[in-house]
Image (spheres, grey):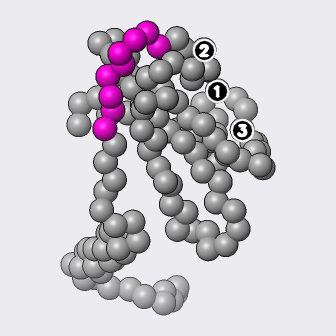
Amino acid sequence: MRYYPFSCSGGMMRIVAACFLCTVFILTAVAFGEKPEYKVYRTTGEIIVNGILDEADWAAAPSAGDFRFPWRTDGEKEQTEVKMLWDDTFLYVSFTCNDKHIWADHYDTNSATCLDDCVEIFWNPDP
């Protein structure tokens, strides 16, 4: 016979799970405050995708950030600057990452690169 430190019926388990999720959502809202907003501006000229952000539109675009690090209480919190622009065909996204200790363990296509030092963008074109 196995002994579990906590057990309850299906109905009670749903109540416990709902309370847990509510607590997580409330703590997240308190920790992060209101959702930040970022306005993406339309380009006024051509953007050349070459990794060099020397177009006037990039200089004028506001930076998304200042990113928060709630899991870190001390030490340097190196920032990443994110900027976005759009035109009739593309959404342009730039990342400027400041990181003195870049590391990666995953190099293959479709590997778990999210576990390495990385930046990612998740896109939902039809929310």
Residue 10 location (% of width, % of height): 26, 76
Residue 60 location (% of width, % of height): 43, 30
- Residue type (three-letter) at the residue carrying disc 1: Thr
Residue depicted at x 35% and y 73%: 30
Residue depicted at x 57% and y 68%: 71
Labels 2 & 3 near each other (Cβ < 8 A): no
Badge 3 local density, few (<14 within 10 Å), some, or many (20+)? few
Between 33 and 111, which is closer to the camera in this rendering? 33
Q: Nearer the viewer, mark 2 or mark 3?
A: 2
The answer to which image quadrant residue 24 occupies is bottom left
Q: Is residue 88 above or below residue 91?
A: above
Is 105 a magenta residue? no
Residue depicted at x 43% and y 9%: 46
Residue depicted at x 70% and y 68%: 75
- Residue type (three-letter) at the residue carrying disc 2: Asn
Taking 17 as reference, is 46 left or right? right
Magenta residues, dominant SS class:
loop
Between 110 and 64, which is closer to the camera in this rendering? 64
Badge 2 local density, few (<14 within 10 Å), some, or many (20+)? few
Q: Residue 50 carries which label?
A: 2
Q: What stretch is highlighted in magenta?
A: 39-47
Mark 1 lies on a secondary structure that is: loop
Labels 2 & 1 near each other (Cβ < 8 A): no
Q: Can residue 60 be seen in this view?
A: yes
Among numbered discs 2 and 3, the one appearing first in the sequence: 2
Residue 95 location (% of width, % of height): 56, 35
Is 40 a magenta residue? yes
Residue 13 location (% of width, % of height): 29, 78
Q: Residue 109 carries which label?
A: 1
Q: Is residue 17 visible?
A: no
